[in-house]
Amino acid sequence: MQHDKVLILDFGSQYTQLIARRVRELNIYSEIHPFNKIPANLEDYKAVILSGSPYSVRGEEALHPDLSQIRAKKPLLGVCYGAQYLAHFSGGEVAPSNTREYGRANLSFIKDDEPFFENVGQGSQVWMSHSDTIKELPTGSVLIASTHDVKNAAYKIEGELTYAIQFHPEVYHSTDGKQILENFLVNISGLHQDWTPDSFVEETVEAIQEKVGNDKVVLGLSGGVDSTVAAVLLNKAIGENLYCIFVNNGLLRKNEFQSVLNQYKGMGLNVKGVDASQRFLDALAGIEDPEKKRKAIGNAFIEVFDDEAHKLEDVKWLAQGTIYPDVIESVSATGGPSATIKSHHNVGGLPDFMKLKIVEPLRAIFKDEVRRVGATLGIDPELLGRHPFPGPGLGIRILGDITAEKVRILQEVDAIFINGLKEWGLYDKVWQAGAMLLPVNSVGVMGDERTYEKCVALRAVESTDGMTADWVNLPYEFLQKTSNDIINKVKGVNRVVYDISSKPPATIEWE
């Protein structure tokens, strides 16, 4: 089935992925491409959205897209930088703003009978985030909305299906943002809303069968949502030709290796568990640098996985749980590699000696869509609701070098924290939680003795995609009980702290 598609041109905004996700929540398929790498097959796209940007249209480094095959030929929506670009280079004027145009604002004027704002009332809250502002509208345009501080908050160009807004409809702070996107894409542009989890499963299963045929496929399972959904999709498509390998890297949560293995077998998957804990600990011995630790864990995983894959005969394909953010984060808006904050060990391909073709059934979808697809496939909601867990596991939650004793301590601490969240009904209110073992010994008193033991930090955040995150205000009573339990039950820990940093600037993991 051919779905209507939306092309989102990325100018480097931190919100670009959110635009794509909001469009998909409307059951419309969307794709992100850098502004300077516009797809050649533009006839495949029914509408185009220009994202925001950290750049200014007035600057020498202004980003210039080639809109010659888009403008006036397809429905076009400019968001923030996109709106200013359309104004600045089409007879309007953009200037530095005199007032602070950042944060919440309310629509104080909406043009009567304007389909772009259908079912959006005056006073509707929107989110502004820009330092420039549109002083004069472009040639042939009509003002369609204002806020108290921003007169030209939205406009349209007559004779075209071109609309532009200086606020961000994709962020949650824009109360009617989803409605505005629906007005533009469905009511104005006429796109069909038929991109659903059911249709994705059906089409992906068919595509896998066509691509793989009767070949054998090997997949490394992690216990996480992505690899599990990928496995169930592949199993539905090719059944016993799927061979899953679940490696214990010694850095999993307490008892996780066996419990996840049992869960997979209960799902009818063909899984082999490999306990390679010692191999990973040996590979990590004496390494303190976070990036070197990640690489050591990634390399050890590839070696173990390769050893096991070679025991299988005639395997032609490697399946990976790569999801859409992994794909788009590898290319920045300016066409070069994105800044490396940390290396993802599930992206970046294979060593040359693994001559396998790759199949990535989840490559086109976001994490929230992966969960919806998993629900459609009938996967246990508890498994789908699992917090994200980093590929390098506790290896990047132990600051400094890694030893078996430090892993034991952190597994015990983590188990008390995570089980406590579940017992208090807090687990599903948190996007991700975990404990960090700090390279700090502090003085304590236990009984009549002084101790000199480890400090652990607890972290719990709320987020929708992990790109930004706020710390969760957990009840003091819960934190008090958890701290007492950890200090009383985990030998080697005498101090517990709670991390109240948001992302940015602090990443979710400490390494």
Image: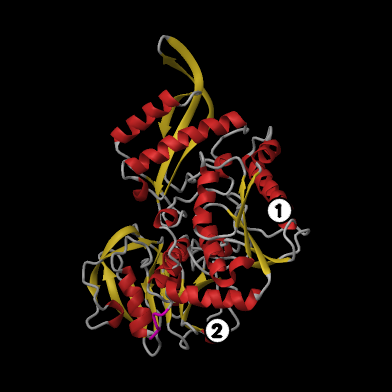
Give the amino acid type for the residue marked by disc 1 in the picture. Glu
| Residue 438 visible to the viewer | yes
The part of the image, by quadrant, that contains residue 103 is: bottom left
Q: Would residue 420 appear left or right of 261 to someone viewing this image?
A: left
The C terminus sits in image quarter: top right
> Where does the image place residue 56, in percent across and percent down from the top left?
49, 64
Residue beneath the point at 37% across and 77% down: 137
Say which of 290 and 402 sits in front.
402
- In the rendered image, the vertical position of residue 68 relative to residue 457, given as above or below: below
Q: Residue at 53% across / 67% down in the picture?
A: 233
Residue 42: mark in rendering: 2
Which residue is at the far top? Answer: 448
Relative depth, front residue between 117 and 253: 253
State the mark number for residue 308: 1
The furthest residue to the bottom: 159
Left/right placement of residue 161 relative to residue 307 reads left
Q: Mark 2 Cα within 10 Å, few/some/many (few <14, many 20+)?
A: some
Say whether residue 192 is magenta.
yes
What secondary structure is found at the residue carrying circle 2?
A: helix
Q: Is residue 7 visible?
A: no
Q: Quick one: 489 or 10, which is closer to the camera?
A: 489
Tell me the CA gap for discs 2 and 1: 44 Å
Q: Is residue 127 placed above or below 473 in the rendered structure? A: below
